[in-house]
Image (cartoon, rainbow, N blue to C red):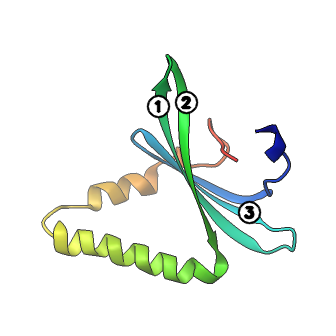
Amino acid sequence: MEEHKGNDREEIFSRKVKAGKRTYFFDVKSTRSNDYYLTITESKRKIRDDNFVYEKHKIFLYKEDFAKFVDALQDTVDHVKNELMADFDFSQYEVEAETSSEDKFGEDLKWD
């Protein structure tokens, strides 16, 4: 791990979303040429050998793909809400997301 030290770029903006046993981090970082990209990290806490470890998966998203990614995500969420679960009331989750104060950057965990 030590060989990667210093290779990560400075975070410009970050948002944390707790979701049950998982935490998602949305981080904006800059390149050496002052361009920006987004990393999405899923972190899941697991027990291994009587210790807690965090299993992480990371996606790098570059500006040229932002619109395509957001469109595909929105289409997929809309399909679940409108086609697969049309009778379910999702408003209970939307209110929770808007009022949650735990999504602020700099709280208990931060990932590289």
78 sits to left or right of 41: left
SS of the residue at dot 1?
A: strand
Quarter the N terminus occupies: top right
Count the numbered circles shown. Answer: 3
Residue 88's x, y, as percent? 17, 62
Quarter-wise, where is residue 35 in the image? Answer: bottom right
Instruction: Give the Cα distance between marks 1 and 3.
Output: 27 Å
Counting residues from the N terminus, which is met first, the one under dot 1 or under dot 2?
A: 1
Quarter-wise, where is residue 91 in the image? Answer: bottom left
Density class for disc 1 (Cα within 10 Å; few <14, some 14-19, many ≥20) is some
Density class for disc 3 (Cα within 10 Å; few <14, some 14-19, many ≥20) is some
Q: Which mark is residue 46?
A: 1
Q: Residue 59 or 109: which is nearer the viewer?
A: 59
Residue at (44% x, 81% y) in the render: 71
The residue under label 3 is 29
Residue 102's x, y, as percent? 52, 44
Residue 24's x, y, as percent? 52, 51
The amino acid type, in three-letter code, at marker 3 is Lys
Q: Which mark is residue 34?
A: none
Instruction: Give the Cα distance between marks 1 and 2.
Output: 5 Å
Image marks 1 and 3: residues in contact by CB distance under 8 Å: no
Counting residues from the N terminus, which is met first, the one under dot 1 or under dot 3?
A: 3
SS of the residue at dot 2?
A: strand
The residue under label 2 is 53
Image marks 1 and 2: residues in contact by CB distance under 8 Å: yes
Residue at (48% x, 76% y) in the render: 70
75 sits to left or right of 12: left
